[in-house]
Amino acid sequence: MSRQFDDVLLGSIELFCMAAEIGSFTGAALAAGVTPAAVSRSVSRLEERLGVRLFVRTTRSIRLTDGGRDYHQQCRSALNQMLEAERQLTGQQLAPSGTLRISLPTTYGHLRILPLLPEFRRRYPQMRVEVNLSNRNIDFVEGGYDMAIRVRAQPDSGLVARLLEDAELVVFAAPDYLARAGTPQRLDDLAQHECIQFELPSSGRRIAWLFNGPDGPCEVLAEGAYVCSEDLLGGVTLARHGAGLFQTYRFMVERELAEGSLVEVLQPYGGRSRPFSLLYPHSRHVPLRLRAFIDFLLEKQAGWKN
């Protein structure tokens, strides 16, 4: 039987996968300890063998073609299987290493995830973490992301979604606002109040406030003169300075509520929540660096108040 793959070809496949995941020939070269020209030659060698374009190249970026995306998924799965076979045969437990690229919602990233990263790095010192803070949907392949956290994850057969947290919602205001405008006692009272709005960056739609009403779960399209987008902390800052009422996640304002600088209202109608989910590409073999981070987050999640 003749050989189908020689050492050069296997090396080219590995460099191709690194370029696809990092999103740059230069980045792949730095990670592999070779020159960018060597990465480019490896990709060209594969394209010539396959007779298809794997990347769309511009002067500033590279992007996988549809064929390149399918080829990358199969090659990465095969490489992971070879690594797993070596670990099982030798009994060797390799430490997670390499670069982990994650995308996080701005507020959730700042308050929940970023404070945990130094501990994660102390546990896995060979890891490097690159963080994208954005409330917009991302392209896993084009952006080279390993994982994202999002609210209300959209169904996608190519992604695995795991619930990380059901984050409770609260309505609050500053004491001086309540002294001026009064404290709402019923949901109908919101019509007489200044209600700070948050606008979804993806659709421009204002988010309805969620409550447990007399007849069950309900939504209220509150009105107000202030509208924020992109960052929920904008609404918290406005409320803190007396602009009006705001609804957001309890974990964002726990300290202010405990100190009394913000006051929770409409408690009898509270208890609603929104889910935050981990999202990552579906694969038979999850990279060790990603598995380590998922397990770390799920461990820390146990200490959060849901």
Image (spheres, rainbow, N blue to C red):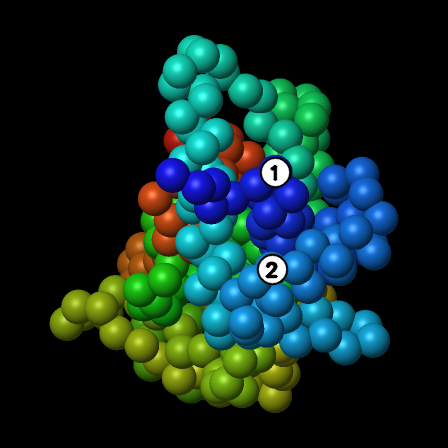
How far across and down, in percent of the image, does residue 6 sit? 57, 41
Residue that label 2 marks: 46
Residue that label 1 marks: 7
Q: Disc 1 residue type?
A: Asp
Horizontal relation, residue 254 to residue 118: left or right: left
Question: Looking at the rendering, in which quadrant would you find the C terminus?
Answer: top left
Q: Is residue 6 visible?
A: yes
**Circle 1 Cα neighbour tier, 10 Å, few/some/many (<14 / 14–19 / ≥20):** few
Q: Can residue 286 be seen in this view?
A: no
How far across and down, in percent of the image, does residue 68 sit? 53, 67
The one of 230 and 171 positioned closer to us in this rendering: 230
In the picture as drawn, the residue positioned furthest to the front comes out as 1
Residue at image location 49% in from the left, 16% down from the top:
93
In the picture as drawn, the residue positioned furthest to the top comes out as 91
How far across and down, in percent of the image, does residue 196 sit? 56, 77
Report how far apart the C-alphas of labels 1 and 2 lie in the structure.
13 Å
Q: Helix, strand, or loop for circle 2?
A: helix
Horizontal relation, residue 155 to residue 136: left or right: left
How far across and down, in percent of the image, does residue 40 sit? 75, 59
The one of 93 and 2 positioned closer to us in this rendering: 2
Q: Disc 2 residue type?
A: Leu
In the picture as drawn, the residue positioned furthest to the left comes out as 215
Residue at image location 60% in from the left, 47% down from the top:
9
- Rendered position, 246 above or below 130: below
Question: Looking at the rendering, in which quadrant would you find the N terminus?
Answer: top left
